[in-house]
Image (spheres, helix red, strand yellow):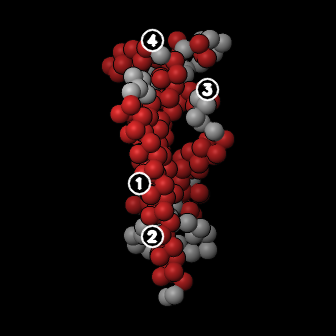
Amino acid sequence: MGRLGAYYARWRSLYELSIISFFIKRNGNKIANAFIKSADSTDRFEWARIAKSFKNYPSDWNVTFDAIQSRSKRATKEWKREYKFVNQLVHASSQGTMYRLGGDTFYSLPVGRTDSGMAISAVHSAISLVQITTDFFTVYSHSDSILAIRTFRKWIDTIIKYYKNVENSLNSIENNQ
């Protein structure tokens, strides 16, 4: 996996954490305690089974991340599509081979390291970090935490602008060579 694949893999982990933090926050202390207690078990997501949204979940099925994600309002259709695409990128699939190295590389594969295409994973990572932090700060919210959340959201706008500028610079350099 190249550098770009590593960026996407990091965002994928942050996205999963943002879904889990949202699910725990929405389902309360009972779920939070089950999550903490499951740390020494081999069951990755069985702690979620006690949530009301899993009431009709078949007892012979393992709870999966996809099952938790489908019960999360944070997991919009767009985020699910991005997550699915990133899973393809970071694994040994045709999408991972042909699109991993900095954008649409179907007709040519760059050789060597490239930062081209990292803006998407950087912006997604910033958004996921803000979501996780917001979940944490709003458990017992007060004026300082609300102010911090507003600051973090403005931080995302700055990150988006910065990475767009970087990517535009890279594209203009590539187009002039």
The residue depicted at 59 percent of the width and 57 percent of the height is 95
Which residue is outermost to the left? 40
The x and y percentages for residue 176 are 51, 87
**Sequence-wise first label, 2 or 4:** 4
Q: Residues within 10 Å of mark 3 (few under 14, many from 20)?
A: some
The residue depicted at 33 percent of the width and 19 percent of the height is 40
* Circle 1/circle 3 CB separation < 8 Å: no
Numbered label attached to residue 71:
3
**Sequence-wise first label, 1 or 3:** 1
Query: Marks 1 and 3, Cα distance to the nearest angstrom?
Result: 28 Å
Q: Quadrant of the N terminus?
A: bottom left
Query: Marks 4 and 1, Cα distance to the nearest angstrom?
Result: 34 Å
Query: Marks 3 and 2, Cα distance to the nearest angstrom?
Result: 36 Å
Q: Amino acid at mark 1?
A: Ala
The residue depicted at 47 percent of the width and 76 percent of the height is 169
Residue that carries the numbered disc 4 in the rendered image:
30
| Dot 1: element | helix
Which of the 4 image quadrants contains residue 17? top left
Query: Marks 3 and 4, Cα distance to the nearest angstrom?
Result: 17 Å
The x and y percentages for residue 127 are 48, 46
Q: Amino acid at mark 3?
A: Arg
| Dot 4: element | helix
Number of the front mark, 2 or 1: 2
Residue that carries the numbered disc 1 in the rendered image:
6
Query: Marks 2 and 1, Cα distance to the nearest angstrom?
Result: 19 Å
